[in-house]
Image: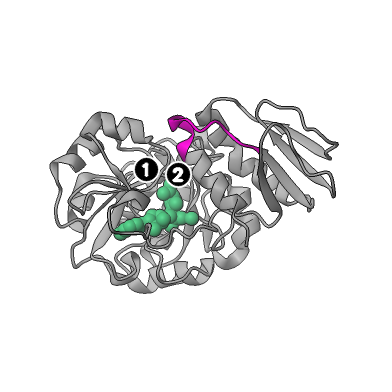
């Protein structure tokens, strides 16, 4: 199979072949997707998938998304393919949308945390697609960070966070979407949004009609397994603030949308005022500021409108008090 030209991402054919070979051997390979970097392993090899949990320090109750490069792979994982899946895949794949569907027995229980469903997604990043094609296997991959830490959007973030817990890092440059995929379940009577992300609720509803949020499902209080409130959290104390009301005490940084800080701060980062531009920068800013060891990071609350849903979700989790 001729290898695609990935030179605009700084990836050589040799690197791609090496990464694919390691995946086939049951090793862990970090790779870029359009959302965040993934920590990949052969989804059909339970021993390889177990190494993902070990490397991340991730509890076994958190199911892992399987990444595919074509529909044949999807159909080898998912037991059913409803019309809504077809509609959404035609519109948003490859892209930042994970579909949760009833699984086939071939998917190891370790991948799905024992659930009867599997989350699948066809990523849009050309390096990710080429890697899956080259390896010729579906790739299980959570974000390539230690459990509860901020997801990586560059290869350097992966190196700093996971070091030699990963066998190989395929560096394809910075991720363009910057926050994780939308997770939508089609395995229930109604479509359920488990995690807002790169594809907005509005976009999904325009395609298939009304969807539920995991938290507003009648009679059921629990969200997606593994969706812990304290996910995506930097080490530094993080505060969501209004009108520039940053703390008066201690050292800190202000992540600014439109206000001026009401007290002195050590550092100000001015963010893009559109949700997509903001999302693309958010984790990188958090990684950088977290490394400064300030007492706090104060973040301007973004507007409560629909297009900010995914960003707000991540900020609330990051600001969740331990
Ligand atoms: O953008 C992304 O989705 C990135 C890149 C690497 O693709 N991956 C990612 O994986 O964010 P992770 O493991 O950090 O988050 C996966 C989310 C979790 O909230 C998990 O609960 C949910 O997807 N999930 C996976 N399989 C599921 C299933 N069968 N049922 C319900 N939720 C599932
Ligand atoms: Mg994650």
Corner quadrant of residue 258? top right
Residue hosting label 2: 33
Q: Label 2 vs label 1: CA separation?
A: 6 Å
Q: At 83% across and 44% down in the image, what residue appears?
A: 248
Residue 79 visible from this viewpoint: yes
The type of colouring in the image is: one colour
Q: Residue at x 76, y 34 (%)?
A: 268
User: Which quarter of the figure is the N terminus placed in?
Assistant: top left
- State which quadrant residue 307 falls in: top left
In this view of the protein, which residue sits in the foreground, 132 or 304? 304
Disc 2 element: loop
Image label count: 2
Label 1 neighbour load within 10 Å: few <14, some 14-19, many 20+? many
| Residue 124 coordinates in the image, percent (x, y) | 38, 38
Residues drawn in magenta: 300-309
The picture places residue 117, in percent across and down from the top left corner, at 25, 60
């Amino acid at each position: 199979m001729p290898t695609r030209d990935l030179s605009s991402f700084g990836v050589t054919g040799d690197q791609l072949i090496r990464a694919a070979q390691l995946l086939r051997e049951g090793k862990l390979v970090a790779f870029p997707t359009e959302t965040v970097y993934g920590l990949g392993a052969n989804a059909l090899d339970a021993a390889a998938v177990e190494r993902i949990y070990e490397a991340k320090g991730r509890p076994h109750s958190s199911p892992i998304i399987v990444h595919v490069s074509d529909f044949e792979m999807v159909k080898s994982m998912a037991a059913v393919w409803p019309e809504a899946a077809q509609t959404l895949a035609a519109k948003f794949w490859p892209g930042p949308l994970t579909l949760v569907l009833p699984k086939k027995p071939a998917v190891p229980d370790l991948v799905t945390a024992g659930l009867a469903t599997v989350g699948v997604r066809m990523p849009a990043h050309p390096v990710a697609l080429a890697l899956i094609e080259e390896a010729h296997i579906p790739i299980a991959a959570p974000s390539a960070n230690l459990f509860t830490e901020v997801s990586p959007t560059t290869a350097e973030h992966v190196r700093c966070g996971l070091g030699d817990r990963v066998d190989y890092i395929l560096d394809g440059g910075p991720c363009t979407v910057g926050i994780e995929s939308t997770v939508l379940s089609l395995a229930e009577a109604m479509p359920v949004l488990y995690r807002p992300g790169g594809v907005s609720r509005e976009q999904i509803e325009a395609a298939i009609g009304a969807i539920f949020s995991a938290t507003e499902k009648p009679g059921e209080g629990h969200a997606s397994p593994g969706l812990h409130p304290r996910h995506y959290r930097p080490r530094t104390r993080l505060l969501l603030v209004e009108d520039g009301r940053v703390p008066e005490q201690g050292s800190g940084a202000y992540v600014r949308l439109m206000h001026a800080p009401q007290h002195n701060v050590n550092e100000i980062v001015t963010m893009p005022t559109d949700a997509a531009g903001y999302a693309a920068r958010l984790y990188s800013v958090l990684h950088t500021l977290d490394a400064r060891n300030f007492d706090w990071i104060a973040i301007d609350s973004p507007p409560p409108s629909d297009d900010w849903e995914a960003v707000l979700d991540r900020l609330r989790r990051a600001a969740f008090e331990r």
